[in-house]
Image (cartoon, helix red, strand yellow):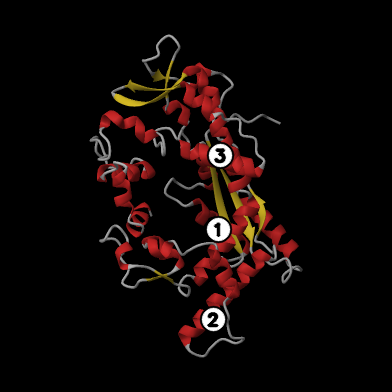
Amino acid sequence: MFEHLLRENDLKVQLQLYGLEDVDIQFIKEQLEGAQPTGSTAWPYTGRTKEKAYLYEIIVNNRNGIDVYKWDYLARDCHHLGIKNNFDPSRYMKFARVIEAEGEIQICIRDKEISNLYNMFYTRYTVNKFAYFHRVTCGIELMIIRAFVKANNHIKYKGKEDTQALNEDEGRPKSLDFGIYDCHKNMAAFTKLTDSVLFTIRTIELPDKPPEEKDEKQRWEDLKEAKEIIERIFRRDLFKCVYESQPRAPKDLRNSLEIDEKSNIEETVFQRMKQETELGEQDIIVKVISLHFGMKEENPVERLKVYSKQTLNEARHLKKEEASRILGPVNFNEVLVRIYSTLSKYKDKDLVDDRSKLIRKAADKILEVKPDPKTPQLET
């Protein structure tokens, strides 16, 4: 997108007036993308040398997740959602220092500021749990996805030849007409894909009866279903979350389901629900929610180097136990399994209660919390 904006608005000339050359533009791109895994120990960037490594921890920090991108959306969303944000970024910046630690120049923080960082990561967890992954929010998201899948082949956005996918060898489309799911391959088309697509689907005119021609009939059926789903959103007739499991560690959930790391939890639960209830993908949707501090099972704070008042230019690793015995959780990743019913509370109101009971009963059986075999059981 940045490259597209440069090209469309002839911004390179303007940037050169301010002394920004191609190497600086490359640096901006690298800042936006963050470090890309290469499998090599060599310095992966060309915008700045290794001596300026700390600059790559400001916008997108892949080392420990402490970056201004996160500060920005936490401050914005907490303000608009009325959620308390206890993290103070100005205090963090006051105590941040650039120090060489273990051969790498990185941003380090004063040891006493660890509690402030836990506030940041806990705020991230809170916003994810109660806003981004709220059960109603996810229900609407699932409806939009289903509508887009149906409308994808029938709603097109015009792209431009010179803004095709940057990787010329990877899935370059032959046509400049892009469906909803392909717009990201062409920035000219992508800039046209806005929230208005919901209204486009909702207001599209269709004949009362399906056409006789096969392709036109398929188009009619797909768009009719997409229109109905979008209309349900506006009427607040949403997919309902009828079951939510207890928060569990991913490993514990996989052990309970008796599946390995390669198995897909959503697909496993769906297939077992299908077997128990005889309901299909048109009736139920299984959604797994993962909540963590930004690095799944890992504690991001432990990837941060700290300095002390006595050694301002020497940084070291600080274990959680050194900072406090009560700071931070024991587990840093939890998953919830939700099951949504697609029934309409208006059209299917006579079936809603019975369907919900059926789903809950089957889900309780499939996702029951089994005792750890290593834990001694009390005799009764």
Location of residue 170 (image quadrant): bottom left
**Can you give x and y, in whole percent of width and height, for residue 86 in the image?**
61, 30
Q: Is residue 144 above or below residue 210?
A: above
Disc 3 vs disc 1: which is toward the camera? 3
**Can you give x and y, in whole percent of width and height, for residue 197 in the image?**
53, 67
Mark 1 Cα shell of 10 Å, populated few (<14), some (14-19), many (≥20): many
Residue marked by disc 1: 270
Q: CA distance from mark 3 to mark 2?
A: 42 Å
Quarter of the image with the N terminus in it: bottom left
Residue type, label 2: Trp
The secondary element bearing badge 2 is classed as: helix
The secondary element bearing badge 1 is classed as: helix
- Of marks 3 and 1, which one's residue comes earlier in the chain? 3
| Residue plotted at (50% across, 46% down) | 258
> What's the mark number on residue 74?
3
In the foreground, 134 or 351: 134
The secondary element bearing badge 3 is classed as: helix
In the foreground, 103 or 199: 199
| Residue plotted at (56% across, 28% down) | 88
Residue type, label 3: Leu
Q: Is residue 59 above or below residue 363?
A: above
Residue type, label 1: Phe
Residue marked by disc 2: 220
Quarter of the image with the C terminus in it: top right
Q: CA distance from mark 1 to mark 2?
A: 29 Å
